[in-house]
Image: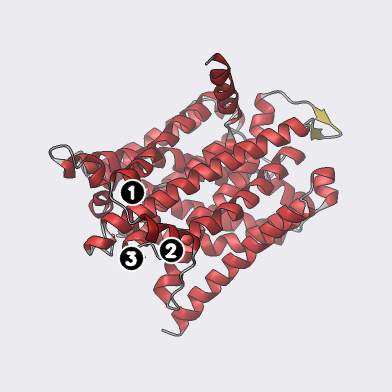
């Protein structure tokens, strides 16, 4: 028993940027998009989970390795090896995508909270924004990373619901492994959103920079201007990354299955409000009285927990991208008085995101549109990541092998084709 406990403890010790990134991937935007997917198409897009797992694992592993090997975030690496047009284009993409995503997530937090608290939408958005900024700016990285890891547990509500509801397992298994494609705009719009909320620009910048933060936290020295990392560090980094991505995709699969079984099969095909999305969790509490309220409570806790996890990751990755591009001090390990620019970007991006909620956009619809925007914005960034990770001059002996390189390029092609198909079917009406 003691040996088992020691092994479990060692596994938990490996948890770091990969697990946090994987959990943040299922932020309110992800939950809304996956729920809409299941409600609209039933089990029809369930196969995307199997496709996305190796794609996101390879892409995020490449980003993490870039950060770990160079000792710099993705933005700094692009700056050192490409011209300013490439740098500014990449930074602009991630900052714009993240700011829109922050706005949608803040709105979702407030909408979810209103399911259980009779409070004004404006008051709730302001309150959540203040809480997130205080946590991100005034807690150190070690404490903050622990908070983020615990918030990841909010995702467990969906896997639990999968096994409570009576499922057509044969149909689900076939849909999981057999692709189903519909040649229309709505199908490609949602599938681009599914890809975009799973393989997102903010994840690329965040994980690369957090590997650097981990190295600083563990006081790794420099060797010729690079961190002293060995095979053991790379092995743990890859394990952390894989666990995070696997955890994320299990949650994704569970959300789509639950939405398909509970919503689609009961004629609910469009998610218009947070209350509509919460209905997917009613079976989890159907043995209790007032199941509707309890479902809303669990849904609200999940959205709030993952929003508090996802929004700081969004603003943090935007801050890393922008401050590294302009040679400013960056890092959650650095105190506010020594990194005004870094925390300034976090604050400004979060506040602009907050303001998006007051221009009349529906919070739930905004989440899905944000996911689609991310799906388009990720395409040129994956192109850059593939080239950097394979570059011997930048990565040395830790450059991507043929398998990693191939999968990242496949990710680029699939996401490009999805975006092109979406715009093509839109043009065709």
Is residue 63 placed above or below 186 in the rendered structure? above
Real-space CA distance between mark 1 and mark 2, rounded to the nearest whole angstrom: 24 Å
Real-space CA distance between mark 3 and mark 2, rounded to the nearest whole angstrom: 10 Å
| Residue with the most extreme front position | 170
Residue name at image x 76 percent, y 50 percent: 400
- 335 with respect to 301 (left or right): right
Q: Residue 156's image quarter?
A: top left
| Residue with the most extreme bottom position | 428
Residue name at image x 23 percent, y 43 percent: 295
Cβ atoms under marks 1 and 3 closer than 8 Å: no
Residue 389 appears in the figure? yes
Residue 217: x %, y % from top left: 65, 25
Q: Tell me the crowding category of disc 1: few under 14, some 14 to 19, or many 20 or more residues within 10 angstroms, Cα based.
A: many
Of 132 and 167, nearer the camera is 167
Which of labels 1 and 3 is toward the front? 3
The label on residue 45 is 2
The label on residue 284 is none
The label on residue 40 is 3
Per the image, the residue denoted by label 1 is 108
Sequence order check: which comes first, mark 3 or mark 2?
3
Of 246 and 392, nearer the camera is 246
Q: Tell me the crowding category of disc 3: few under 14, some 14 to 19, or many 20 or more residues within 10 angstroms, Cα based.
A: many
Q: Name the secondary structure under disc 1.
A: helix
């Amino acid at each position: 028993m003691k040996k088992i406990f020691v092994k479990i403890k060692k596994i938990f010790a490996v948890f770091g940027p990969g697990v946090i990134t994987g959990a943040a991937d299922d932020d309110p935007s992800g939950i809304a998009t996956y729920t809409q997917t299941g409600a609209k198409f039933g089990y029809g897009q369930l196969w995307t989970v199997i496709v996305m797992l190796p794609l996101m694992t390879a892409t995020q592993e490449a980003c993490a390795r870039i950060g770990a090997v160079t000792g710099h975030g993705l933005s700094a690496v692009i700056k050192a090896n490409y011209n300013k047009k490439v740098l500014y284009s990449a930074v602009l993409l991630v900052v714009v995508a993240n700011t829109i995503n922050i706005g949608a997530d803040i709105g979702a937090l407030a909408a979810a909270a209103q399911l259980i608290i009779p409070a004004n939408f404006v008051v709730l958005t302001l309150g959540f924004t203040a809480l997130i900024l205080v946590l991100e700016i005034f807690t150190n990285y070690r404490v903050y990373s622990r908070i983020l890891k615990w918030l990841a547990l909010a995702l467990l509500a969906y896997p639990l619901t999968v096994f409570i509801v009576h499922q057509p397992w044969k149909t689900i298994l076939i849909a999981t492994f057999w692709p189903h494609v519909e040649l229309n705009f709505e199908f490609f719009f949602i599938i681009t959103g599914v890809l975009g909320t799973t393989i997102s620009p903010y994840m690329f910048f965040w994980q690369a920079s957090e590997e650097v933060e981990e190295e600083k936290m563990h006081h790794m020295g420099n060797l010729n201007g690079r961190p002293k990392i060995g095979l053991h560090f790379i092995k743990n980094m890859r394990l952390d990354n894989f666990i995070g991505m696997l955890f994320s995709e299990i949650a994704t699969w569970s959300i789509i299955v639950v939405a398909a079984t509970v919503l689609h099969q009961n004629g609910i095909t469009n998610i218009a409000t947070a209350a509509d999305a919460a209905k997917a969790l009613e079976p989890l509490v159907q043995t209790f009285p007032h199941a509707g309220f309890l479902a809303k409570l669990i849904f609200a806790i999940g959205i709030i927990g993952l929003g508090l996890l996802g929004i700081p990751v969004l603003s943090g990755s935007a801050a890393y991208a922008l401050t590294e591009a302009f040679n400013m001090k960056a890092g959650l390990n650095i105190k506010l008085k020594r990194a005004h620019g870094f925390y300034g970007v976090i604050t400004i991006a979060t506040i602009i995101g907050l303001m998006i909620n007051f221009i009349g956009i529906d919070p739930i619809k905004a989440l899905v549109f944000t996911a689609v925007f991310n799906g388009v914005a990720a395409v040129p960034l994956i192109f850059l990541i593939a080239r950097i990770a394979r570059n011997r001059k930048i990565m040395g002996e830790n450059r991507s092998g043929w398998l990693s390189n191939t999968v990242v390029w496949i990710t680029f092609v699939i996401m490009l084709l999805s975006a092109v198909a979406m715009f093509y079917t839109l043009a065709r009406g």
